Image: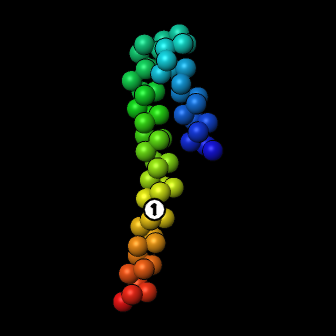
Amino acid sequence: MTSLAAGLGMFPLAWGISAGADMLRPLAVAVIGALAISVLLSLIATPLFYCLMWRGKAAG
């Protein structure tokens, strides 16, 4: 929820709506991309890794 709010807060800068957005557009795009990747890693990769480790421990 926090990542979604931060990403949505950066959209006006990424679209160039506000004053001074030309200078901050690359920063906004980078922040939105980093938030998207971190959400994917925390919601998909971490539980998957934990599940694989749990299976390895149970099999061994």
Total marks in image: 1
Name the spot of residue 24 as percent of width and height, x first.
44, 20
In the rendered image, the quadrant that contains the N terminus is top right
Foreground pick, 2 / 60: 60
Q: Residue at x 45, y 34 (%)?
A: 31
Check disc 1 and give the amino acid type: Thr
Name the spot of residue 47 as percent of width and height, x first.
48, 64
Q: Secondary structure at mark 1?
A: helix
Q: Residue at x 42, y 36 (%)?
A: 33
Q: Which residue is mark 1?
A: 46
In the rendered image, the quadrant that contains the C terminus is bottom left
User: In the image as oriented, which residue stretches furthest toward the bottom?
Assistant: 60
Picture colour scheme: rainbow
Is the residue 7 above or below the residue 16 in the image?
below
Is the residue 10 above or below the residue 47 in the image?
above
Is the residue 47 above or below the residue 25 in the image?
below
- What is the crowding at mark 1: few (fewer than 14 residues within 10 Å), some, or many (at least 20)? few
User: In the image as oriented, which residue stretches furthest toward the top?
Assistant: 19
Name the spot of residue 43 as percent of width and height, x first.
51, 55
Q: Residue at x 57, y 35 (%)?
A: 6
